[in-house]
Image (spheres, rainbow, N blue to C red):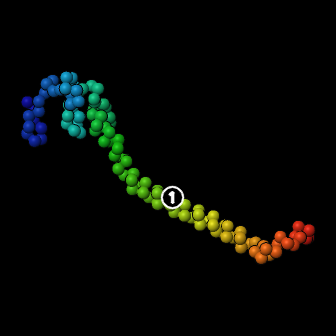
Amino acid sequence: MTTTRHSEPLPGLAHQRCFNHALREAVARCPQCGNYFCRECITEHDDRVICAACLGKLARMPLLRRPAFAGLMHFAECLLGIFLAWFFFYLIGEGLISLPSSFHEQTLWQANWLDKK
């Protein structure tokens, strides 16, 4: 009988049952969690067999790093929005400043400015 690192006896695979399906015979042991699984519950990933739960954990690993990047992206989007709002109002202000003073004094509409050459 073989033993594990902790000197516990390792029972044979032939006597094991699936962790998820108690009536099914186990065909493999997941190297991540150490549980035994049937053919339906185990899959091959990176040249090794692994259970669906551990595969899900491996697939979610990059997402653990994403919140920091997502926070940075939200900050950049906020800065871009503030810059665009400032630029919009800057252009409106420049347009208002470029209007002639007669427009602000409401005399532009009284004069016949279309006929002037």
Q: Is residue 24 visible?
A: yes
* Residue for point 10% across, 42% down: 6
Of the pair 67 and 94, the residue shown nearer to us = 94
Q: Residue 17: x, y in percent?
A: 18, 26
- Residue 104 is left or right of residue 20, and the answer is right
Q: Amino acid at mark 1?
A: Glu
Locate the C terminus and report the quarter of the image it occupies: bottom right
Q: Residue at x 16, y 27 (%)?
A: 16
Which residue is drawn at the image coordinates 42% and 57% (left, top)?
71
Q: Quadrant of residue 40?
A: top left
What residue is shown with label 1? 77
Image side of residue 64 versus residue 9, left or right: right
In the depicted view, which residue is nearer to us: 56 or 28?
56
In x, y percent, where is residue 55? 31, 37
Q: What residue is rendered at 51% in x and 63% in y?
A: 79
**Residue 56, percent from left and from top:** 32, 39
Q: Is residue 48 visible?
A: no
Residue 91 sits above or below residue 13 on the image:
below
